Image: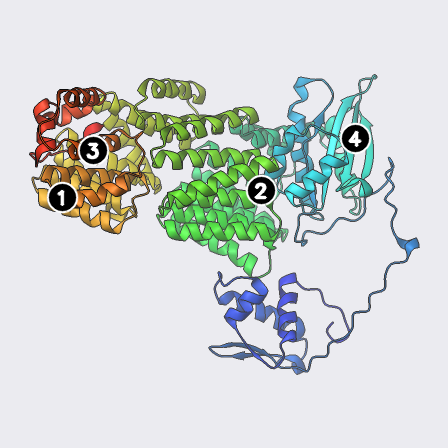
């Protein structure tokens, strides 16, 4: 109340005024205000200054109130007023005034909470298809997406993310129990469940259940000839407090829009994009539709310029309609577009603008997790792994604080993925396995799918190839079940990388052929580039060196153009490949790309390989030793570095230092050929310090037979005399690192 008149304010400004009034005549630091009102010190102090300015405007309608909030320069703020605490006098509602909860066909639901609620008010679950018509399968998720979109557009009810509810397609029961389970697992106050069937006359009968338990259940039946019109009637029913639009409903195009939403939720981006664009030519285009359009353009095509323009149009529309939560979601999409197009400066600017809307109180905390997830992805592409891990962890907290279970698990999955680059692989694997368990329990199948993909990557990095293949195949199975063609192909490509590293080349080649036939000519750029890198790996291991190098060079050029972190992966591989073929100048050029690589172990291995080929053996050994003592060895590059250093110490005869290093190597996976080879030779050396017995020579030859590339690249080792030299003392130094020689 200001001057005995009620004044409307944003929730965050209200909380700020309440905290100031609760501590009158006391200097409060900015950090104290951030922790008490915002619940974090993650944002800049300028956010506090803007919020205080808004609070002053709210209460300073005349000169007498201008001094209520005093700025204490360099410290914080003080509330200079006499504060009186009054008892709260809120009368209990009379029993006669209490609304009836009887479920009748004509009943109107009680008012749902507004958009500013902490928890989402409503979860729109996929429709049950009881019509017995497989051609209506699109309506199961498509109509749910249409209802979600229309309710969100009206803006009177906060609706849970359609990404979270889309995974409830497999609900096996109908009734209050399903609603209660959905509310509990999705963190919403109510859920909407619908089923449709054909009547004997051929019409549609659409039945709805709205509520969270048996006692507050609202039920209604709609009947008509057009299923999409019935879905629109459900929207009017749920949004009963709003005046329904009297404009004629373009039913056909509303149905096409529902089909577009269905395709997007299924992951069929190639079908969703043209369908949505057709709808946008016929229907009134909302900012949310433009946001979906921009996301499809980014994921399905390489036209980042058009995606950016579409998202910018969506942002202008959301700003004109003062949809601040939607603005934050659009800023998150603009950030992702910037990352994919290599414009990390623009991506960072969009992140800051989106976060400012949240922390200034203009947007709700419900969208904070989304912008933080986008920021963590951006920091990952910038090579700022430590910072990205912290941001992803903050996104988990933000989603949990507003009950957004879907984004909480999505952020946790991203956190686990980012931890691989720190690298903290044991923690990453533990976290990703926890996400798999939690998402399976909650029915969040799409996040479970993503967690399996990340888990496959992590297990592949620690060379647990069997577990990695199993995880990627589970991801492919879930993708296929959900109808996500792009995710299915991505999982198969990921499996191909693991198979190549494991030496299972026939299976890898079959995977490549399958992915090529599934993708076609219009494949999304992120899929086609990943497949090209996997195919180049395969070609190299098969001995097709020129073709492999040509393909990887093209991928390096693409990654450098778009600013992708994969440029470091491509450059490090090319550096080793060039050296295997004696192309020293090209290897040196590839090494220059690694100048800003945050992975010091990968950079050190390439530098050591170059020094070896220049005959600078001591410098190469010192380079590896320096990186080994300062960098973690959890990741693939760190493990390779340990193997390379161990082999060089074995060549030198430095058994004392080798013994210390082998304690770390002993924890590594024996599924990795270079690791197994070094462990075997070291064990033999301890057991047989002199002349090797004949049985040992046969075992040595059997090992070499499994590694034909090693025989080509290190001829001196591939003989009984080579084994004897390894066991008895120092050997002639090799010009090839062990892991490269085995490839």
Tell me which label, 1 or 4, sits earlier in the chain: 4
Q: What's the distance in space between the residues labelled 3 and 1, CA to CA?
A: 25 Å
Task: Indicate the quadrant where residue 512 lies.
Answer: top left
* Left or right of 164, for residue 270: left
Residue position for label 3: 683
Q: Circle 2 is placed at which residue position?
A: 406
Q: Do the residues labelled 3 and 1 touch (CB within 8 Å)?
A: no
Neighbourhood count class around disc 1 (C-alpha, 10 Å): few under 14, some 14–19, many 20 upward: many
Work out whether residue 587 or residue 480 is closer to the camera in this orientation and state it.
Answer: 480
Q: How crowded is mark 2: few (under 14 residues within 10 Å), some or many (20 or more)?
A: many
Check residue 693 in the rendering and tell me which mark sits there, or answer none.
none
Of the numbered discs 2 and 3, the one sitting upstream in the chain is: 2
Q: Position of residue 318 (x, y in %)?
A: 60, 49
Position of residue 393 relative to residue 59, above or below, is: above
Q: For residue 246, say whether it is visible.
A: no
186 left or right of 627? right
């Amino acid at each position: 109340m200001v001057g005995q008149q009620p004044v409307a304010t944003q929730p965050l400004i209200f909380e700020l005024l309440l905290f100031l009034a609760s501590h009158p005549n006391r200097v409060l630091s900015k950090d104290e205000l951030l922790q008490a009102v915002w619940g974090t010190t993650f944002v800049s102090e300028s956010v506090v200054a803007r919020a205080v300015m808004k609070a002053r405007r709210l209460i300073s309608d005349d000169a007498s109130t201008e001094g209520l909030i005093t700025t204490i320069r360099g410290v914080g703020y003080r509330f200079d007023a006499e504060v009186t605490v009054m008892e709260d006098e809120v009368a209990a509602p009379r029993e006669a005034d209490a609304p009836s909860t009887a479920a009748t066909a004509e009943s109107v639901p009680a008012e749902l909470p507004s958009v500013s609620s902490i928890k989402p008010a409503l979860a729109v679950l996929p429709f049950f298809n009881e019509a017995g018509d497989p051609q209506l399968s699109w309506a199961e998720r498509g109509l749910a997406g249409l209802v979600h979109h229309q309710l969100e557009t009206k803006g009177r009810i906060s609706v849970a993310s359609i990404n979270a509810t889309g995974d409830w397609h497999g609900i096996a029961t109908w009734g209050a129990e399903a609603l209660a389970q959905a509310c509990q697992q999705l963190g919403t106050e109510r859920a909407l469940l619908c089923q449709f069937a054909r009547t004997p006359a051929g019409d549609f009968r659409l039945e709805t259940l709205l509520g969270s338990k048996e006692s507050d259940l609202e039920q209604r039946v709609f009947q008509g000839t057009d299923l999409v019109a019935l879905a629109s009637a459900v929207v009017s029913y749920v949004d009963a407090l709003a005046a329904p639009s009297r404009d004629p409903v373009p039913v056909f195009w509303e149905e096409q829009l529902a089909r577009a939403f269905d395709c997007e939720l299924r992951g069929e981006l190639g079908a969703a994009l043209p369908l949505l664009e057709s709808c946008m030519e016929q229907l009134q285009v909302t900012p949310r539709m433009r946001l979906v359009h921009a996301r499809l353009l980014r994921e399905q095509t390489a036209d980042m310029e058009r995606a950016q323009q579409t998202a910018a149009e969506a942002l202008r529309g959301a700003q004109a309609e003062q949809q601040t939560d939607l603005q934050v979601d659009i800023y998150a999409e603009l950030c992702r577009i910037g990352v994919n197009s290599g414009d990390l400066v623009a991506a960072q600017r969009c992140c800051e603008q989106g976060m400012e809307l949240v922390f200034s109180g203009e947007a709700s905390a419900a969208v904070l997790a989304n912008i933080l997830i986008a920021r963590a992805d951006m920091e990952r592409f910038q090579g700022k792994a430590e910072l990205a891990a912290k941001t992803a962890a903050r996104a988990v907290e933000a989603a949990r604080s507003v009950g957004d279970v879907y984004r909480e698990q999505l952020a946790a999955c991203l956190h686990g993925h980012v931890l691989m680059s720190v690298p903290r692989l044991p923690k990453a694997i533990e976290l990703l396995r926890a996400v798999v368990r939690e998402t399976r329990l909650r029915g969040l199948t799409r996040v479970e799918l993503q967690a399996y993909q990340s888990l496959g990557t992590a297990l592949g990095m620690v060379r647990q190839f069997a577990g990695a293949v199993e995880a990627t195949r589970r991801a492919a199975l879930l993708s296929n079940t959900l109808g996500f063609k792009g995710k299915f192909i991505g999982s198969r490509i990921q499996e191909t990388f693991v198979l190549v590293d494991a030496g299972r080349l026939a299976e890898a080649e079959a995977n490549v052929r399958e992915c090529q036939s599934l993708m076609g000519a219009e494949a999304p750029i992120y899929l086609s580039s990943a497949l090209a890198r996997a195919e180049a790996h395969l070609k190299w291991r098969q001995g097709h060196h020129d073709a492999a190098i040509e393909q990887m060079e093209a991928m390096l050029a693409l990654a450098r153009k778009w600013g992708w972190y994969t440029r470091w992966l491509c450059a490090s591989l090319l550096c080793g490949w060039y050296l295997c073929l004696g192309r020293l100048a090209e290897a040196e050029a590839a090494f220059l790309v690694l100048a800003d690589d945050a992975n010091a172990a990968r950079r050190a291995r390439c530098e050591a390989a170059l020094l070896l080929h220049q005959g600078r053996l001591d410098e190469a050994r010192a380079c590896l030793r320096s990186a080994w003592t300062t960098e973690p060895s959890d990741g693939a590059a760190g493990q390779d570095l340990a193997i390379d250093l161990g082999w060089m110490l074995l060549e030198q005869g430095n058994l004392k230092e080798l013994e210390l290093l082998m304690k770390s190597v002993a924890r590594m996976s024996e599924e990795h050929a270079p690791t197994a080879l070094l462990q075997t030779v070291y064990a033999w050396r301890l057991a047989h310090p002199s002349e090797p017995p004949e049985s040992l020579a046969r075992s040595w030859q059997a090992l070499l037979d499994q590694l034909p590339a090693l025989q080509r690249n290190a001829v001196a080792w591939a003989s009984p005399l080579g084994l004897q030299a390894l066991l008895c003392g120092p050997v002639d130094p090799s010009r090839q690192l062990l892991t490269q020689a085995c490839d």
